[in-house]
Amino acid sequence: MELPLVCVVLTGCTVDEMLKDASLATAAGADLVEVRLDKLWTREMELEESEEDDDAKKSRNGEVEYEVQSLDSVDLKSALSSFKQGIELPVILTCRPERQGGYYPGDESSRIEVLRTAIESGVSWVDLEVDISATDRKSLREKASGKTKIIASYHSEEHPPPASEIVAEVEDYSTQGDMVKICYPIQGSEGALRIFEAAWELRNSEIAMSLMGIGSGGDWVRIHAPLLSQNMVYSTMQVGWHLTHSGKINVSDLTTAWKLLGYSS
């Protein structure tokens, strides 16, 4: 059984923090890593050292809270150069806008320039949201042509629709990149099963895809990704109880699960 590519989403808000996480991901056997460029414009919120504040620092899905920094606080070209020199694995560069759960503080035109600069750096993959304007998408795809693969991504604010609608969305987005990535917020088994059912229906499709949920049960499709013929699984180097509730999974736990389920030797 062919295994999906395992992508570790790097944690941290600085280049050094991300490079350190990339080194750990490499040692853990990841196939590639995702650099969230928009996180460079954030800092973890500083709270007083107390048990109450530690609890308050965690959101309900266990993620730390961030405060967004000014647009001029990041030297993008220097950061991209450091990533290129300091990360051994292939890289996905992403700059998520606020409308899809990201942190980039600038307007859309400046974000498009960030993505254009990312492509010009010679990166292996770039993540382009499906709601980018047709004109900007065409320009970015022409810039990426022949050297950088494109992930057509959609991070929904709504819970998963019926599986047939998810399948239709994947098919609609398949012309916008080399791989389709769709992520839904879920609250329990119904949403998780809808994503799983859609992935099952698409398992014999020629469309490269990565479907997932954020929330309890969101790790079902990730764990069974080889069975579902998913092309890429997003993982993390983070550990802790909150991963189960967020639908995320540690890269070592993921590979262990695949072995236990007989998906890999």
Image: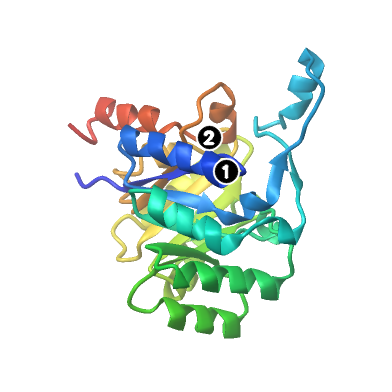
The secondary structure type at the circle numbered 2 is loop
Kindly check if marks 1 and 2 are in contact, taking CB atoms under 8 A apart as contact. Answer: yes
- Quick one: SS at disc 1? helix
Q: Is residue 254 left or right of residue 105?
A: left
| Disc 2: which residue | 217
Badge 1: residue crowd in 10 Å (few <14, some 14–19, many ≥20): many
Residue at the (71%, 28%) spot, across then down: 58
Can I make out residue 245 in this image?
yes
Sort mark 2 into few (<14), some (14-19) or many (20+) by Cα contacts within 10 Å. Answer: many
The picture places residue 81, in percent across and down from the top left corner, at 47, 59
**Which residue lies at the image location 26% right of the left edge and 45% below the top edge?**
3
Q: CA distance from mark 1 to mark 2?
A: 8 Å
| Amino acid type at mark 1 | Gly
Q: Is residue 15 above or below residue 21?
A: below
Name the foreground residue: 237 vs 182: 237
The front one of 163 and 256 is: 256
Residue 131 visible in the displayed image: no
Q: Mark on residue 191?
A: 1
Quarter of the C terminus within the rendering: top left
The percent coordinates of residue 175 (x first, y second) are 43, 76
Q: Position of residue 43 (x, y in %)?
A: 71, 42
Q: Which mark is residue 255?
A: none
Instruction: Locate residue 53: give its quadrant.
Output: top right
- 229 lies left or right of 171: left
The amino acid type of the residue labelled 2 equals Gly
Front residue of 5/46: it is: 46
Residue 70, percent across and down? 77, 56
Q: Residue at x 19, y 44 (%)?
A: 1
